[in-house]
Image (cartoon, rainbow, N blue to C red):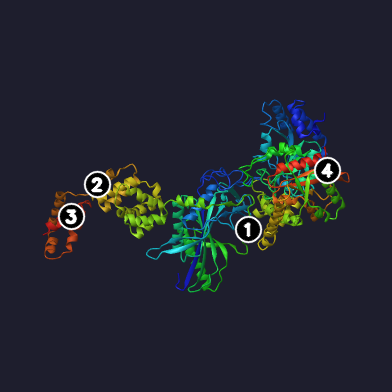
Amino acid sequence: MKDNWESVIGLEIHVQLNSESKIFSNAPTKFGSDQNLQACEVDLGMPGTLPVLNEKAIEKAIKFGVAINAEIAEKVGFARKNYFYPDLPKGYQISQLDDPIVGKGSIEIQLGDQEIKTIGITRAHLEEDAGKSIHDLFENETAIDLNRAGTPLLEIVSEPDMSNSEEAVAYLKKIHSIVCALEISDGNMSQGSMRCDANVSVRKKGEKKLGTRTELKNINSFKFVEKAINFEIKRQISCLEKGEEIVQETRLYDAINNTTRSMRSKEEANDYRYFPEPDIIPIQITSDQIQKIKNELPELPDEKKERFINELGLSEYDARNLTYDLELADFFEKTLVNIDDPKLVANWILGDFSAILNKFDAEANNSKVDAVKFAELLTYLKEEKISGQATKKVLENIWENPDLSVSKSIQNLGLEQISDDNEIEEIIEKVINNNPDQKEQFLSGKDRLFGFFVGQVMKESKGKANPKLVNEILKKKLV
Amino acid sequence: MNLETLTLQEQIDGLREKKFSSVELVENYISVIEDKEDLNIFVSNDFEKALEKAKKSDGSKKSQEDVPLNGIPMVHKDIFCTKGIKTSCGSKMLDNFYPPYSATVVEKLEQAGSICLGKANMDEFAMGSSNETSFYGAVKNPLNIKKTPGGSSGGSAAAVAANFSSFSTGTDTGGSIRQPASFCGIAGIKPTYGRVSRYGMIAFASSLDQGGILAKNIKDAAIALQCISGYDSKDATSIKAEVPNFSEDCESSEFEHVVGLVTDLIHSFGDEDLSKNYGEAIERLEKLKIKTKEIELPNLELSLPVYYVIAPAECSANLSRYDGIRFGYRAENVENLEDLYFKSRGEGFGNETKKRILIGTYCLSSGFYDAYYKKAQKIRNLISSDFVNAFKDVTSVMLPTTSGEAFDLGSITDPVEMYKQDIFTIPANLGGLPATSVPFGEKNNMPLGIQFIGNILEESSLLNISNKFQLGEK
């Protein structure tokens, strides 16, 4: 970003809650069934049908509220948000306006070595998801799939507390890790379980007043959040520098071309004509209910991070990165069951293990190398039976051949470390004999040639020689 | 014996004593119905299935307790969804609608053993006081075919008055059971909001709509109400409360009554006939030695404007689902999505419905919400608390059902005049209170009605006083 500008960002995150049935009907919420098979008469908005609130959705929303230290409403009421769209069966969405279930709260984020930053959460409210319009199924016609209609959503609205796309991503990741830890959502962004709108504005540094904002709609990955915001910041700055004004509008992020384009302006915005939903009587939430949920709260990402630092001796950096992704954290802890070396395991999980997950587009919970096998592999390394380089190779090998055991893989690849003194001595003698000039130079004071000999020995042993032993023996032999 | 003129109680007794069969009852009704087709009472019928069911119930060994209405023919207002049977709600919009489910009220009456003969005509989406807004044309009052049967449950009221059945279902949002009952000289009850499930009852104004019964007399209404009442997990606004034995309570001698009167208020309308009939009703109470007490309902007159903000507001949202996409009328030859909406809704809805959608949309618009909808809700609370105060001293309140007798079809063209029809009935809807209409008095050879409003969930006491009043002196 150019030096004299700063940006202000707020996010609205829609989290699909993982209740078995929909928020106002008994239809199942499972993802991926055939079109319209998971929509009952209530979801279709058939005449005479009525919504009945799913208590589980309330419970899950309260869990989130408690986790971010927010105020929980005593009275939870719903409202109708009126607009016409073919995938909105009733012609209104049941949402919340005046009595959101979760009030003001906050979470903390941290980037690199920077200081911890608190991001305010304005509110989180419950609402029903709409269906989907499918434009490419029939030629010149739009198809409607109402399976998603009525899926419970928690809309989490942040304060405009973020000042760049990295913070926005860190915030989104934090929310993601919290809802996953609470097990109130599967957090699957590619399936739309978590979707995000970003409000972006820019202003000259030092300016107190917020600039005119635009709203970026429906961004469905961490990567796109970053890209969409970065693009929009640049666009707004270049507009303003050209002397143009920013129009308050809703813009759609186009991931293919990495641009944003105008969807509708403020003037074209719907008048949603909110009014209290008469079909659902406001419900009371008791302090007992909240206390009970508080007592049963699972370990949250921040608590896990603290535990990793204090009890396992991890660095702040490693602990933070491990707890962003709870599946990773979980894999970490499962690995520790069979190998008691948290630092080593953390290094490998955040390094090569994450790299391989990335490479094969996998998640820790469906890793082809399970935690037991991974622990076994790292034990070979820890006991110096194989080198670090070899460990990497074995990891890839057992990933690609899940039936292969660790020992078999090491054997197949011929990567067992040579820790036999005699065998190493033999190799060393051979190397020294083959390089008489270098030996002479070393003996006459060129100390750095020691490294040359180590390299030659490793080469000769095809990387299998135990480096520690090589050092020891080489020192003796070169005197 | 004219089976079709029997009361519900008489039919229940006759069937039990095997004086006649359910098949005979149904056949009798079918011939009456076919004779009086001109009244335009039915939108659809299901005679074949009715006869089939009658045969079955004649052979049924189930006990009276399990199926209290075994073999009894009845009529549903066409606002109640009936599985596989057209449910039009009086609208072109739903002229092709065959619901895949039945309303809870329909299921309950089926479980009670009753047999539906057909679906009764009504004002479109229950919006009207004369049945003239129906897509199928107005129902004629069986007592005088030039007159309206009232609305919106005009078909249901006319069905009972014309001996199409001994009782029928209706719905009441602002008087739609009580006003037609009064116009047709029969009894009607709108129970407490939440007493009867609204599931499968096509919504007009959700916070006011309530299903109920129209019958020849209060006792019959009590018997039928018993069968449709009770908590329903499919309706979040239905009340979890025991359902008392209404038909027993209706005739019990254990209820103490103090009837609240608003004599000054009635006089203030300056209508001599209205005051006279109200005065005669008070005389009847005195003769029955029932205690009375003059009370005040200071905000009663605000009911009308409040109602005509809240009901249209709710209906504007409730009727958004009729968009031509998933069910109901869909216009042909449309250019795009917007055109599909405009034409389907433009062609599918009648004028009264459109008018109310417009009023409601306006009242909820940004900038008007506080002035209309929010204010109306505040006044609604005031009216409710008027009743809460009144019920500290009295057990029911007596009002006229309507300000006059059934008027000529086509005679009221001013919408505000038409809306004024509901002035005495709307308050009970705003307060969620149970209310009955009992035939009492007449004007120009047409019946009039007296209304009793009870306290929340006090239908037993309400039915008891209404029944006493209807029976008069012994």
Give the residue type that dot 4 points to: Lys
Separation of marks 1 and 4 at Cα, in angstroms: 57 Å
Outermost residue on the right side: it is: B444
Q: Is residue B255 left or right of residue A329?
A: right
Disc 3 versus disc 1: nearer the observer: 1
Residue wearing tag 1:
A272
Q: Residues within 10 Å of mark 1 (few under 14, many from 20)?
A: some
Give the residue type that dot 1 points to: Tyr
Q: Residues within 10 Å of mark 3 (few under 14, many from 20)?
A: many
Q: Are marks 1 and 4 in contact (CB under 8 Å)?
A: no
Residue B13 or residue A252, whichever sits in front: B13
Disc 2 versus disc 3: nearer the observer: 3
Residue wearing tag 3:
A470
Q: Secondary structure at mark 4?
A: helix
Give the residue type that dot 3 points to: Val
Separation of marks 4 and 2 at Cα, in angstroms: 112 Å
Q: Position of residue B379 (x, y in %)?
A: 70, 58
Q: Is residue A377 left or right of residue B71?
A: left
* Residue at point 13%, 60% (across, down): A439
Disc 3 versus disc 4: nearer the observer: 4
Q: Position of residue A473 (x, y in %)?
A: 15, 55
Kindly identify which numbered label has been placed on residue B371: none
Task: Tell which circle, 2 or 3, labels the residue nearer the N-terminal end.
Answer: 2
Residue wearing tag 2:
A414
Residue A138 or residue A246, whichever sits in front: A246
Kindly identify which numbered label has been placed on residue B287: 4
Residue A315 visible in this rendered orientation of the protein: yes
Q: Tell me if residue A336 comes above or below residue A229 in the rendering.
A: above
Separation of marks 1 and 2 at Cα, in angstroms: 69 Å
Do marks 2 and 3 share a chain? yes
Badge 1: chain ID:
A
Separation of marks 2 and 3 at Cα, in angstroms: 19 Å
